[in-house]
Amino acid sequence: STREAEIKLKSESRVKLFYLDPDAQKLDFPSAEPEVKPFEEKFGKRILVKCNDLSFNLQCCVAENEEGPTTNVEPFFVTLSLFDIKYNRKISADFHVDLNHCSVRQMLVPTSPPLMNGSQSPPAFQDVLHAAAMQYPKQGIFSVTCPHPDIFLVARIEKVLQGSITHCAEPYMKSSDSSKVAQKVLKNAKQACQRLGQYRMPFAWAARTLFKDASGNLDKNARFSAVYRQDSNKLSNDDMLKLLADFR
């Protein structure tokens, strides 16, 4: 009887597989199953995040002819994500943001022609603004199904690979003559961008609370914390959760 039960179970399972084929739907099976609704994506509390600017005190004009705006002296790349320290987990995908001025982006040597909708041909002039908006988005939507005060919006900042984090962060932590330091950092950054522009290294992180309560009310008065140096031995999500717990 056990053998017969196994054969019956396998036979019924095979019959169910035929319902995946549209042509099989036309067949008259004696035990037709009820119609299954398609998957419906469910959203929780949706938050629009808009990134405006990333500015350090160390700034100067990066153009060779010294004609242009005063900006950061090297490119920085921001990654935004949500961390839940109550349940000890990361709860979102990464949203990558490039807030560099166009003159700073020019410090990076492109490794390959840019891809525009699967084509390597240059975009038309009238599409330049639209392409820039698609290539460098500044707005992203996060969805949280179970909001509470222990959810943090974390910004992790990277820069072009240059060396140890101690050496790279030191100029930004000094209070000496910023103009001379900025020129020195700019010179080193240009050399690094020419040789290692496609490689990144962790630089710093900052965080802010997202909700005031478990009802999903946004904490609009919260601001990003001071920017903390990102040590090379604390890069994993588990390390970030520990840092956020201490920060909380």
Image (cartoon, rainbow, N blue to C red):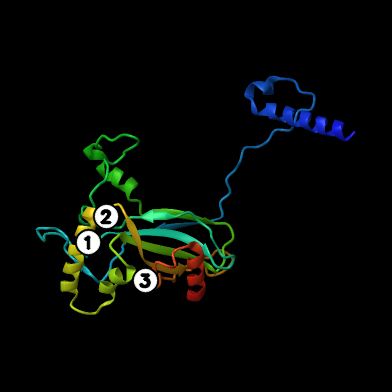
Image quarter (top left, top right, bottom left or bottom right) of the N terminus: top right
Q: How many labels were placed on the picture? A: 3
Q: Which mark is residue 196?
A: 2
* Residue at the spot 45% in from the left edge and 54% down from the top edge: 141
Q: Amino acid at mark 3?
A: Arg
Q: Describe the element under mark 2 as helix, strand or loop.
A: helix
* Residue at the spot 44% in from the left edge and 71% down from the top edge: 222
Would residue 21 be found to the left or right of residue 29 on screen?
Answer: left
Q: Are circles 2 and 3 on residues that touch, CB within 8 Å?
A: no
Nearest the viewer among 13 and 25 is 13
Residue 242: percent from left, percent from top? 51, 70
Residue 59: percent from left, percent from top? 21, 68
Residue 244: percent from left, percent from top? 49, 71
Residue annotated with mark 1: 189
Q: Amino acid at mark 2?
A: Leu
Mark 1: give few (<14), some (14-19) or many (20+) Cα within 10 Å.
Answer: many
* Residue at the spot 18% in from the left edge and 77% down from the top edge: 177
Residue annotated with mark 3: 229
Q: Amino acid at mark 1?
A: Ala
